[in-house]
Image (cartoon, helix red, strand yellow):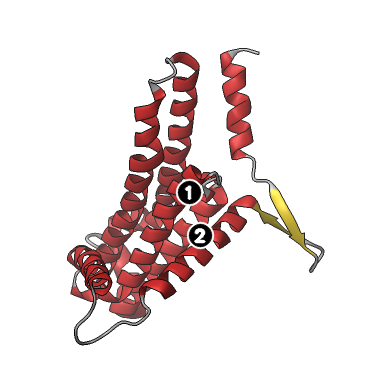
Amino acid sequence: MSITEDLAEKLLEELNCETVFTIPIFGGIPIAESVVVTWIIMAALTLLSIILVRNLKVENPGKKQLVLEMAIGGIYNFFEDLVGEEGKRYIPYLISVGIYLGVANLIGLAGFKPPTKDLNTTAALAVMSILLIEYSGLHKKGVKGFIKGFAEPSPIIAPINILELFIKPLSLCMRLFGNILASFVVMELLKQFAALLVPIPFSFYFDIFDGLIQAYVFVFLTALFIKESVE
């Protein structure tokens, strides 16, 4: 088997969304591996949240609480600078998605297949984000102002503004999915052509740094779109 055929086979295997089990209702609902891994991430983050917020104090807080408050406060202030005063109500969503994506992109280090390698996962996240983005504009401007916004700054570009409703979620989805998949392809090529120790620093970059960067880019763009929508 040639290197190209081997890479293509591994790529198809990586893209294959295996059905872990089927829920026996409505004729059977298949549950994909990405969904199961997402459930594991949700359970782990929920348990971690419960552990971290136990025994919080208003007076004389412990070191754990101070570190937690500093971290959450820093993240909150970062997003507040992005979305502005009008977008503050959407910050919890941005933080939640950012944490989920960060963990999801790094979970491959624990032996799980990252759910972001499933196009359905990235598409669902993109649809959720774009619905929130459009809702933020509708909530701020009202129905009349929201519709009028498609004709700004000039009615002649209204078709382009309407087209953006479909371009934005596609952009968010394919950027996240494409970068995660590209890192897999590059690592496989390095394993094929490079020496044994050469892929190690690249693995550190693609498996850790790049995964966190993609999570950051996704929520950063979502925050910018929300700010643009509520302005």
Inspect the image, locate mark 1, and give the three-letter code of the amino acid beneath it. Ile
- Residue positioned 61% across, 20% down in the render: 6
- Residue positioned 58% across, 31% down in the render: 11
Inspect the image, locate mark 2, and give the three-letter code of the amino acid beneath it. Ile
Q: Nearer the viewer, residue 16 or 141?
A: 16
Q: Which mark identifies residue 107?
A: 1
Q: Label 1's element?
A: helix
| Image position of 81 with respect to 200: above or below | below
Q: How crowded is mark 2: few (under 14 residues within 10 Å), some or many (20 or more)?
A: some
Q: Do the residues labelled 1 and 2 touch (CB within 8 Å)?
A: yes
- The reply to whether residue 102 is in sight is yes
Residue identifier under label 2: 41
| Image position of 198 with respect to 10: above or below | above
Q: Label 2's element?
A: helix
| Image position of 67 with respect to 216: above or below | below
| Image position of 29 with respect to 213: above or below | below
| Quadrant occupied by the C terminus | bottom left
Of label 1 and label 2, which has the lower sequence position? 2
Q: Nearer the viewer, residue 147 or 199?
A: 199
Q: Position of 120 compared to 68: left or right?
A: right
Residue 177, horizontal then vertical, whole percent: 47, 44
